Image: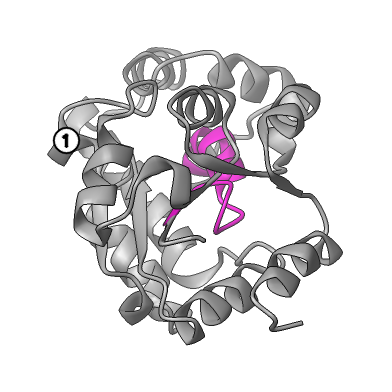
Amino acid sequence: MIKGVIFDVDGTLIDSMGIWSQVDAMYLEKHGFQATEELSRQFSTMTMESSLQYMKDTFHIKDSIEIMLHDILSLVRDFYLHKVSLKSGMKELILTFHKNHIPMMICTSNEKSLIYETMERFGLADYFMYILTSDEVGSGKDNPEIYYKACQYMNSKPENTYVFEDAIHAASCAYKNHFQLIGVYDDYSQMYEKKIKEMSVHFIKEEKDIYPILESFNKY
């Protein structure tokens, strides 16, 4: 019997992964420059710091790197708070778990306040016991510590805890540490779809894929 549920956010609860590959081009357009597809692909292979320095040097942007970073993060924040959409079926799952009195946590590498405000926008913030971040735990999702910590909050064990993840490193970590993995398809991790599906007790690619989960709680 499931005693707790852990949700990732980016690429799992919300369709947000694209913003991180597009925000550099959005920044340039805001400053009157057009980013080519080739340049956008180049940005996707760079760190944030490297892409900012490249833009500053190539397009002779006068702002400091610090100001540029602030402006880019403002674009990201605007996207989360006004444009990002929930992944299909996620709200129904959250409501089902809530009706069955199953505690839920968010585990994310993103910023806590941004995620809270995003969930609040969808009317879902109060359904989660806590938003636990990688910064709080001191490790990323290639380390199971964040999942173990969430279990402590929910008084659950790995074997009776669902973990919803879209990224291969996080999914693999949850699986190897005996959590009940529910893989979630995302375009940005599609090359790992087969591997994630093999590790998962359920795999969600379309809304119909949530029905077996709902059925197990007699809610479908």
In the rendered structure, the answer to whether residue 62 lies left or right of residue 118 reads: left
**Colouring used for the render:** one colour
Of residue 195 and residue 191, the one placed in the foreground of this image is: 195
Position of 85 relative to 39 (above/below): below
Q: Amino acid at mark 1?
A: Val
Location of residue 25 (image quadrant): top right
Of residue 41 and residue 185, the one placed in the foreground of this image is: 185
Q: Residue at x 41, y 62 (%)?
A: 3
> Is residue 196 within the magenta segment?
no
Residue under label 1: 137
Q: Residue 31: in sight, yes or no? A: no
Q: Position of residue 204 (x, y in %)?
A: 74, 51
In the rendered structure, the answer to whether residue 44 lies left or right of residue 146 reads: right
Position of 45 relative to 36 (above/below): above
Q: Quadrant location of the C terminus?
A: bottom right
> Is residue 18 within the magenta segment?
yes
| Element type where label 1 sits in the image | helix
Q: Position of residue 18 (x, y in %)?
A: 61, 42
Q: Position of residue 176 (x, y in %)?
A: 49, 22
Which segment did they paint magenta? 6-27
